């Protein structure tokens, strides 16, 4: 089951951003979220996951499917609608919060060290690129000049 909203509690639209730096939704989607039908919400969730996955798919590899599945179960991950790279990313975030190594969960970071600094840098880089792609998507969709 997915969260009721993509909000992560770090909204930058209140400061004038057209794309939220926290959840990566467009400002009008945040304002209108509660009025959207389920299919509209699902379309936004799909876009967000797709953009996130396009960033993470080459940065995280599952090297041990059994360890990976066990780690998902241990951390009570229930995102059944996430792709493999989406699950890997969410698992990495949870592992990082607990100070656990990705290799123990069957994950390999590509281009980053497996230590705390490498994991944090990957998370920062993914967030930055996810935001950049969300802004580009907004600009393409609504034909505005680059911000």
Image (cartoon, rainbow, N blue to C red):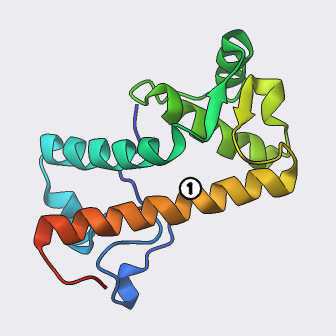
The quarter holding residue 61 reads top right
Residue 4 percent across, percent down from the top left: 36, 47
Outermost residue to the bottom:
15
Of 93 and 125, the residue lying toward us: 125
Q: Residue at x 43, y 31 (%)?
A: 82
Residue 23 percent across, percent down from the top left: 42, 61
Q: Is residue 68 visible in the rendered structure shown here?
A: yes
Tell me the quadrant of the picture where the C terminus can be found: bottom left
Give the side of residue 46 with respect to residue 71, left or right: left
Q: Is residue 111 above or below residue 144?
A: above
Give the side of residue 60 with respect to residue 16, left or right: right
The quarter holding residue 124 reads bottom right
Of 20 and 61, the residue lying toward us: 61
Residue 129 percent across, percent down from the top left: 49, 61
Outermost residue to the front:
111
Give the side of residue 51 with respect to residue 40, left or right: right
How many marks are shown on the rendered structure? 1
Tell me the quadrant of the picture where the N terminus can be found: top left
Q: Residue at x 72, y 59 (%)?
A: 121
Q: Is residue 24 visible in the rendered structure shown here?
A: no
The residue that disc 1 covers is 126
Q: Residue at x 37, y 61 (%)?
A: 133
Q: Residue at x 28, y 47 (%)?
A: 47
Outermost residue to the top:
66
Residue 72 percent across, percent down from the top left: 65, 24
Of 56 and 26, the residue lying toward us: 56
Give the side of residue 19 with respect to residue 109, left or right: left
Label 1 neighbour load within 10 Å: few <14, some 14-19, many 20+: some
Q: Is residue 105 above or below residue 126?
A: above
Determine whether the residue tagged by mark 1 lies in a helix, strand or loop: helix
């Amino acid at each position: 089951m997915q969260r009721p909203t993509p909000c992560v509690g770090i909204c930058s639209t209140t400061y004038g951003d057209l794309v939220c730096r926290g959840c990566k939704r467009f400002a009008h989607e945040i304002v209108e979220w509660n009025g959207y039908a389920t299919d509209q919400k699902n379309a936004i969730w799909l876009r967000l996951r797709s953009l996130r996955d396009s960033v993470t798919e080459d940065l995280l590899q599952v090297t041990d499917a059994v360890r990976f599945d066990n780690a998902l179960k241990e951390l009570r991950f229930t995102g059944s609608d996430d792709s493999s790279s989406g699950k890997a990313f969410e698992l990495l975030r949870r592992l990082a919060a607990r100070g656990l190594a990705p290799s123990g969960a069957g994950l390999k970071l590509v281009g980053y060290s497996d230590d705390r600094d490498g994991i944090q840098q990957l998370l920062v880089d993914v967030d930055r690129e996810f935001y950049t792609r969300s802004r580009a998507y907004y600009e393409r969709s609504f034909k505005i000049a680059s911000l």
